[in-house]
Image (spheres, rainbow, N blue to C red):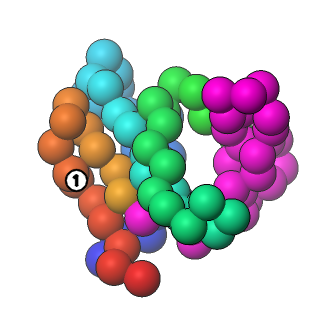
Amino acid sequence: MQPVQDILNRIRWDEHWKGDEFKIGYYDRIEDRLIVVAFNEIRFPKGDHFTFEVIDQDGELHSVPYHRVKAIFRNGDLIWHRKH
């Protein structure tokens, strides 16, 4: 399985994927469910190689470790997933 960081970097930098719609599904331990967010809502803190940030519907900032990413969708199709 390809590491999630490789897929996220490809989404960020691959010219062939520009213009496609990506969504990231990550597991939220508090809500005990998968949260799906648009890739363009994610921020990557400079120098942080383990997490990304996302702001929820209430305006709260969350730092999400890469190991919690469970699914990545491209144009509505599942292109990557992690079982556990």
| Quarter of the figure with the N terminus | bottom left
Question: Is 58 located above or below residue 5 in the figure?
Answer: above
Residue 9 relative to residue 7: left or right: right
Query: Residue 54: percent from the left, percent from the top?
Result: 68, 38
Question: Is 44 located above or below residue 82 in the figure?
Answer: above
Residue 24 relative to residue 15: left or right: right
Residue 9 in view of the camera = yes
Question: Is 17 located above or below residue 4 in the figure?
Answer: above
Q: Give the camera-side residue of 46 and 78.
A: 78
Tag 1: amino acid? Ile
Question: Is 71 located above or below residue 68 in the figure?
Answer: above
Query: Residue 69: percent from the left, percent from the top?
Result: 50, 61
| Quarter of the figure with the C terminus | bottom left
Query: Residue 57: percent from the left, percent from the top?
Result: 65, 28
Query: Residue 5: percent from the left, percent from the top?
Result: 52, 59
For image coordinates 36% across by 58% down, the residue present is 71
Task: Look at the numbered disc 1 and give the secondary structure of its residue.
Answer: strand
Q: Is residue 42 magenta?
A: no
Residue at numbered disc 1: 79
Residue 73 relative to residue 10: left or right: left
Q: Give the camera-side residue of 53 and 14.
A: 53
For image coordinates 76% across by 46% down, the residue present is 62
Q: Is residue 64 magenta?
A: yes
Which of the 4 quarters of the picture holds residue 2? bottom left
Q: Give the camera-side residue of 15 and 1.
A: 1
Neighbor class of circle 1 (other Cα within 10 Å; few <14, some 14-19, many 20+) is: few
Residue 43 in view of the camera = no
Residue extending farthest to the top is: 19
For image coordinates 33% across by 79% down, the residue present is 83
Q: Which residues are magenta?
A: 45-70
